[in-house]
Image (cartoon, grey):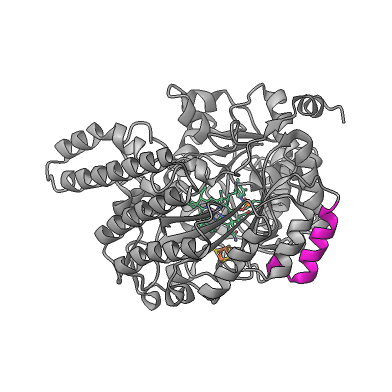
Amino acid sequence: MILLHPPSVYDFREKSIMFGPMSDLVPSSPIFEMYPIGFLTMSNYLQKRGISVRIVNLAYRMYHEPGFDVEAFIKKLNASAFGIDLHWLPHCQGSTEIAKIVKKCHPETPVIFGGFSASYFYSELVEFEGVDFIIRGDSAEEPLYRLLCVLKDSANVPGQNEQADNYYYKSLSEIPNLVYRRDGKVYANPIECISADLEDIDFDYSIMFKDVLKYRDIRSVVPFCDWFRYPITTIPVVRGCNNNCANCGGSKSAFKLFGNRTKPAFRSPEKLVDEIAAIRKYINSPVFLLGDLNSNGKDYVMEFFKSAEKLDKNIQIFFEFFTPPEKWFFDKAATVFKNVCYEISPDSHDENVRHKMGKTYTNSQLYESISYALSKGSLRFDLYFMTGLPSQSAGSILETVEYCRDLYEKLGWDSRFMPFISPMAPFLDPGSRIFENPQKFGYTLLFKDLKSHIKAVTNPSWKYILNYESHSITADELVRSTYEAAKGLNRLKGKAGSITENVMLENEQRIIRAEQTMEKIDEIMTISDEKLKEQKLMELKEDTYKYSLSTVCEKKELEFPLSNRSFKSLEIVKTSIGIK
Ligand code: B12
Ligand code: SF4
C-alpha cells in the first residue's frame, strides 16, 4: 500500500495565491505539507500484519523540488492500493486532483480515501473521479487492513463472474466504516470500528527510518519542510475530545457526527511514556504531547508523571492545556522534567467571546496558571488567540493586544511568556458547532459542500478563501485587524525580549508587506477583464509566496527554546537494517 499526502492546492507552483497567515502557527508551510500522524499508526498496524506500506509526502517533494514531476513519479510507483488523505479540509483540491492522476496512471489500482474531511463529505466525495473507497471515522487501521485483505485476494477481482462478484461485494459489505460503490450505487457501511482504548495503535517513528532504507528515498517521508533542522515529534494523548469548542471539527459533537464517536479514547500513560522513550532512542528532539492530560482527570495525570519518572529528566517536552491547570500540575511537572513548555488557547481575551467558543475559564484563572508555571521554572508559556470568532469585533481583536500588554506588565515583562494571534482560516471546520449552526453563532456560511471549498481554496487571497462571514466583522476588517494585532503582539514580544529586536523588526516589515500585497490583490480583483486580472495576479506571485510565510510571527518562535537536538545516526541505521 502506498499512502500519498497531497499539497493543499495541487497546482500551487503555477498559481499565485496569498494564503496569508493560515499556517503561521503550525510547522507546515501554506501548502500544509505535514501528513496526518495517522499515516504512522496505519503503517505500523498494517506492517505488523504483513502488509508493506510506503509513505510518500508528495506535498513536501513538490515544495522542495521545483522540477518534481508528480505524474512521472506516480507512474513509476507500484502498489496494490493507494491511500490519499483528505483529513484537513484545505487539502480538498490537492487530494482530489492527485486521485485523478493516480487513476490515470494506474487505472486498475484501487484508490482509498480517509481522514476527517473525507468522512464528513463522504457522500459527495465518493462520486469524484478516481475515488474508489472511503474509510470513515477516526479509527481507520482495522477497516483498512480488512479492505486490503479483500483487495489482495486475486480470486476476489470483480467482473470475472457472478459468483466472484457476489463474494467480493459481500466481503466489502462486512467491513465497518467502509464506503464503496456497486453498479453505480453507493453503500456506506455503519461506522462501528471506533477504537475505545487505542491499545493496538502505535506511534512508532522508527517506521519512517525503515522506509528510508527500503525505498532509498528520504525525501518522501519527511513530515514537514524544516523537520531536519527542527525534528519535533508529536504523540497524541487521546482520540476524540471531551470539549466542544464551537469552531472545532475535532470536538465532541463533530466526532459524533463524522465518526460516530461518543467518548474520547485516552491512551494508557505507560504507553505514552514508552513511546517518548522510543523516540529518544533515535532523535534527541522536543516531544509535543497532543491533547490535555488533565482532561482525563487527576489520577490519569499522576499515573503519567509516575511512569515518566523513568525518562531522562532533560527531555524537552511540550504540554498543551484546554483549561488552565491547578498548581499541583506544575509542581509535579517541575519535579519530573527540567525542560518544560506549556501552551493554551484562550481564543480571545474577552471572556464573553471565549464563552461563546465553549470555554468557561476566566482571565484570572489564566493569569494564575501562567504566573505559577513560570515561577516553577517552565521555559515557555505560549498563549494562542484567534480572530474571526463569534461576536468578536475589530475593536475586540485590538484589545487582545492591550490585554497581553497588561499580562506582560503583571509578569514583569517575563520573556518566557509568548502570545500569538492568527485568523480562523482558511475554513470553519466542517462538523463544528458553528459550521452546523452558523446563524446561532452570528455567521453566514458562504458555502457548505466539498465542490465549493475546492473552488474557494484557489482564490487569490485568504480573504476570498474563507468559507464564512461573521456578522460582527467584515472580511476587510478581519484582515486589517488580524495584521494590526499581530504587529502589536510582535512589538510586545520584542519589548519583553521574547524575540530579538532584529526578529521583531523583520516580522513587522513582513506584516506591512503582507498588508500591501493584500491591498494590491483587492485592486486587481476589481478588474473585469479576466485575462488581465490573471496576468496581474501572476505578477504578484513572488510576493504572495513570500508574504504567506512567517507573517503573524516568525516560524522559529514556535520552537522549543533549547537547541540541543540531533539524530542518533547509529541507532537509526541499526533499526533500518533490522538490528535491535
Ligand atoms: C494534532 C492535531 C494537529 C497537529 C498535526 C499532527 C499530525 N501530523 O497529524 C498540528 C498542530 C500540526 C495540526 C495542524 C493543523 N490542523 Co489539526 N488537529 C490536531 C488534533 C488536535 C488531533 C488529531 C490527531 O492527533 N488525530 C489522531 C491520529 C492518530 O489520527 P489521524 O491523524 O486523525 O488519522 C486517522 C484518521 O483521521 C484516518 N485518516 C487520516 N488520513 C487518512 C488517509 C487514509 C487513506 C485513510 C484510509 C485514513 C486516514 O485514519 C487515521 C488512523 O485511524 C485535531 C482535533 C481532534 N480533536 O482530533 C485537529 C484537527 C484535525 N486539525 C484541524 C486543522 C484545521 C488543522 C490545520 C489546517 C490548522 C491550520 N490552519 O493551520 C493544520 C493543518 C496542518 C498540516 N496539514 O500541515 C481540524 C481539521 C478540520 C477539518 N476537517 O479540516 C481539526 C479537526 C481540529 C482543529 N481545528 O484543530 N493539527
Ligand atoms: S479545539 Fe477544543 S474541541 Fe477541538 S480538540 Fe481542542 S479542546 Fe477539543
The residue lying toward the viewer, choosing from 8 and 411, is 411
Point out the stretch of residues depicted in magenta.
294-309
Q: Is residue 223 visible?
A: yes
In the rendered image of this protein, does residue 451 appear above or below residue 557? below
Q: Is residue 9 visible?
A: no
Q: Which residue is rendered at x = 30% and y = 47% of the image?
A: 461
User: Quadrant location of the N terminus?
Assistant: top right
Q: Is residue 121 left or right of residue 307?
A: left
Q: Is residue 187 left or right of residue 457?
A: right
From the image, give the main secondary structure of the stretch colored magenta.
helix
Ligand 2 located in image quadrant: bottom right
Marker count (numbered): 0
Q: Is residue 453 magenta?
A: no
Q: Which residue is rendered at x = 37% and y = 31% of the image?
A: 13
Locate residue 413, reporting x and y percent. Answer: 49, 57
Locate residue 8, reporting x and y percent. Answer: 45, 43
Q: Quadrant of residue 81?
A: top right
Q: Which residue is rendered at x = 75% and y = 36% of the image?
A: 206
User: Quadrant location of the C terminus?
Assistant: top right
In the rendered image of this protein, does residue 61 appear above or below residue 114? above
Q: Is residue 296 magenta?
A: yes
Locate residue 539, reporting x and y percent. Answer: 23, 32
In the rendered image of this protein, does residue 405 appear above or below residue 106? below
Q: Is residue 128 left or right of residue 142?
A: left
